[in-house]
Image (cartoon, rainbow, N blue to C red):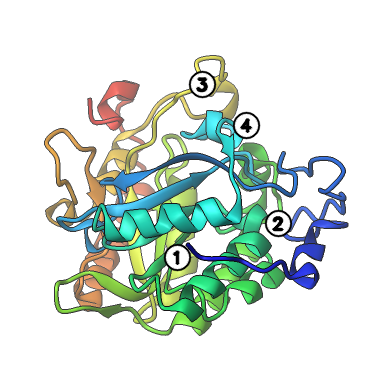
């Protein structure tokens, strides 16, 4: 069993908390922050996960630990119950045991820490002990919304091998409307740059699993195809040849009370569908019925060539032909 000595200087970050870009300043030893979390780790699920990119999953699965609470709060969140705090409180020692169980007993290809940013001091302390002891020898994946502060990422330097990061929006208006974060774009772009600086260019192991690097994800939202195109335009010159790209199409409404029309999310047009299906030949899918996901493949040149062709094609449709497309039912874009 790994023993984790308390390091008060690290955990002091929970006093007047500034870990995320919200910078709420709450003393989380006394009450919860904007994210909803206090100073104690809270986890909603820990198990092999088969729904990530192929270079993370393969035949072994990704050892995912889903943390409760979230600092971003997207209106369309697919993990709404977790984001609202569903889960159980655990100690750092128990989290260590979970990661080692995923590695040693379930043979996970990596350990995948999902939405852990608001617990970064505790998680960093635990990872440092696991690294020092040599007990954890598979890659550590930091699975994040992209809404990360430089301070938090600095805590993770040398401890995280792979950043699996969202880049959700291209403009502050959409970011404010859907995630109440008008500063999302500038924050996420700066975070991605810092992540790439920490990990370097993507590196694959002999078995084809990603061992190090950054994967940038973009979820195509129905009704926001122009924003998706602009987001790809922002990413293209910044990460080409330096990170992998994953375009996702699994948008799903899980909150039945959500007024989708109020947020412009109720339907997708033909252009949205085309972008969602970009690079279908590279989709993942270990299990039958898995929603298709356009995934980063191992040849970055092929990825960017495919993306560049799709961008040009989409621009022709949107700008020259002015095609907005027939409206399609929600079930179509969900892959049902």
**Label 2 packing within 10 angstroms: few (<14), some (14-19), many (20+):** some
Residue of label 1: 233
Q: Nearer the viewer, residue 237 or 297?
A: 297
Question: Mark 1 to mark 4: distance in Å?
Answer: 33 Å
Residue at 86% in and 57% down: 15
**Dot 2 lies on which element?**
loop
Residue of label 2: 183
Residue 199: where, in percent of width, then height?
A: 45, 81
The reply to whether residue 145 is visible in this rendering is no
Given this view, does label 2 or label 4 mark the residue nearer the observer? 4
Question: Mark 4 to mark 3: distance in Å?
Answer: 12 Å
Q: Nearer the viewer, residue 58 or 15?
A: 15
Residue 239: where, in percent of width, then height?
A: 43, 76
Residue 251: where, in percent of width, then height?
A: 39, 35
Quarter occupied by residue 100: bottom left
Residue farthest to the front, as pictured:
1
C-beta proximity under 8 Å, tags 1 and 4: no
Residue of label 4: 84
Q: Which numbered disc, 1 or 3, marks the residue that appears first in the sequence?
A: 1
| Residue 21 shown left or right of residue 323 in the figure | right
Whether 297 is drawn above or below 65: the answer is: below
Given this view, does label 3 or label 2 mark the residue nearer the observer? 3
Given this view, does label 1 or label 3 mark the residue nearer the observer? 3
Q: Quadrant of the C terminus?
A: top left
Whether 142 is drawn above or below 204: the answer is: above
Residue at 79% in and 57% down: 14
Q: Which numbered disc, 3 or 2, marks the residue that appears first in the sequence?
A: 2
C-beta proximity under 8 Å, tags 1 and 3: no
Q: Which numbered disc, 1 or 2, marks the residue that appears first in the sequence?
A: 2
């Amino acid at each position: 069993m790994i023993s984790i000595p308390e390091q008060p200087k690290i955990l002091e970050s929970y006093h007047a908390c500034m870990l995320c870009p919200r910078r709420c300043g709450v003393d989380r030893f006394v009450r919860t922050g904007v994210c909803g979390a206090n100073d104690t780790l809270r986890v909603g699920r820990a198990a092999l996960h088969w729904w990530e990119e192929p270079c993370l999953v393969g035949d072994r699965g990704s050892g995912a630990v889903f943390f409760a609470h979230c600092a971003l709060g997207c209106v369309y969140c697919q993990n709404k119950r977790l984001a609202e705090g569903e889960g159980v409180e655990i100690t750092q020692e128990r989290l260590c045991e979970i990661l080692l169980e995923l590695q040693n007993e379930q043979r996970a290809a990596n350990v995948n820490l999902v939405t852990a940013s608001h617990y970064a001091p505790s998680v960093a302390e635990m990872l440092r002990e696991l690294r020092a002891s040599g007990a954890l020898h598979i890659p550590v994946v930091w699975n994040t919304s992209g809404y990360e502060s430089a301070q938090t990422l600095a805590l993770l330097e040398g401890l995280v091998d792979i950043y699996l990061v969202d880049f959700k929006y291209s403009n502050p208006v959409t970011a404010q409307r859907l995630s109440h974060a008008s500063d999302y774009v500038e924050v996420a772009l700066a975070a991605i740059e810092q992540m790439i600086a920490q990990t370097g260019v993507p590196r694959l192991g002999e078995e084809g699993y990603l061992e190090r690097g950054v994967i940038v994800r973009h979820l195509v939202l129905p009704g926001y195809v122009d924003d998706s195109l602009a987001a790809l335009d922002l990413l293209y010159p910044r990460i080409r040849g330096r990170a992998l790209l994953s375009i996702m199409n699994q948008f799903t409404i899980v909150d039945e009370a959500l007024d989708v029309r109020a947020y412009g999310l109720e339907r997708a047009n033909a252009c949205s569908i085309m972008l969602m299906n970009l690079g279908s030949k590279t989709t993942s899918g270990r299990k039958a019925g898995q929603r298709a996901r356009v995934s980063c493949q191992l040849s970055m040149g092929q990825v960017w060539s495919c993306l560049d062709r799709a961008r040009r094609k989409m621009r022709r449709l949107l700008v020259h032909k002015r095609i907005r497309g027939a409206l399609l039912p929600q079930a179509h874009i969900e892959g049902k």
